[in-house]
Image: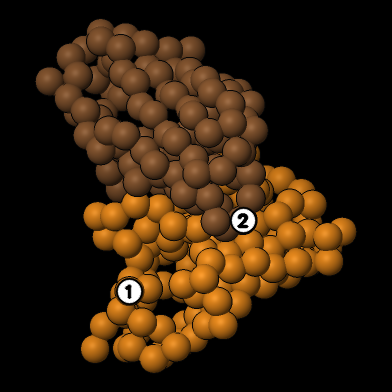
Amino acid sequence: ETTVTQSPASLSMAIGEKVTIRCITSTDIDDDMNWYQQKPGEPPKLLISEGNTLRPGVPSRFSSSGYGTDFVFTIENMLSEDVADYYCLQSDNLPLTFGSGTKLEIK
Amino acid sequence: EVQLVESGGGLVQPKGSLKLSCAASGFTFNTYAMNWVRQAPGKGLEWVARIRSKSNNYATYYADSVKDRFTISRDDSQSMLYLQMNNLKTEDTAMYYCVRRLGLDYWGQGTTLTVSS
């Protein structure tokens, strides 16, 4: 089983700042990392899929990078609407495993 | 538009059973693998089960935490996904989401299961 270690657990950022979240996997997963945003009372929304691919309709201020075992998710110029929980997911092998989540708040 | 609508959640006593359903529309259901993912109250996300398409022999896979208790199935003629849950435990209490494909691209709104005496 691939373990996904996500950090930090929480972030408090000012509007306009750059947000960085990291996920490290215990096995090499190529670029099979996905990133989700979840707002209270809603299901997770896929923002970035395997191969660091931005999903249609997702603002370009969201991006990701990484290959192998080290992955980074970035929000350039944070907006108030970005307040949410963020999760990474490895889809290279079963069982699918998620990071523990990052709670993003406004400073 | 892809839509996934879960139903069947509720309150069940420990060791009880329940069957969740998911109605899919807006895509060619029979060509996609489907999953169940759950989220305990205030906690993170946990993948539960996956079923592949007919072309992949409807192969099924389970998280260790639910193996031998849960059964995922599908009815392609009705575009329906199911999760039969037996011998339920309090730790199965969660929101259960129906999710499309290996990369978990589209999610339903979820249905809530509470296991409590």
Q: Position of residue B72 (x, y in %)?
A: 62, 72
Is residue B84 rendered to the left or right of residue B78?
Answer: left
Chain letter for the residue marked with disc 1 in the picture: B
Q: Residues within 10 Å of mark 1 (few under 14, many from 20)?
A: few
Which label was assigned to residue B79? Answer: none
Residue plotted at (67% across, 72% down): B73
Q: Give the brown chain's letter.
A: A
The kind of residue on which mark 1 rests is Glu
| Secondary structure at numbered mark 2 | loop
Which label was assigned to residue B91? Answer: 1
Residue B96, visible in the rendered structure? yes
Location of residue A13 by image quarter: top left
Vertical arrangement, residue B16 with respect to residue B22, above or below: below
Q: Nearer the viewer, residue A73 or B116?
A: A73
Residue plotted at (45% across, 36% down): A24
The kind of residue on which mark 2 rests is Leu
Which label was assigned to residue A94? Answer: 2
- Residue at the bottom extreme, as displayed: B15
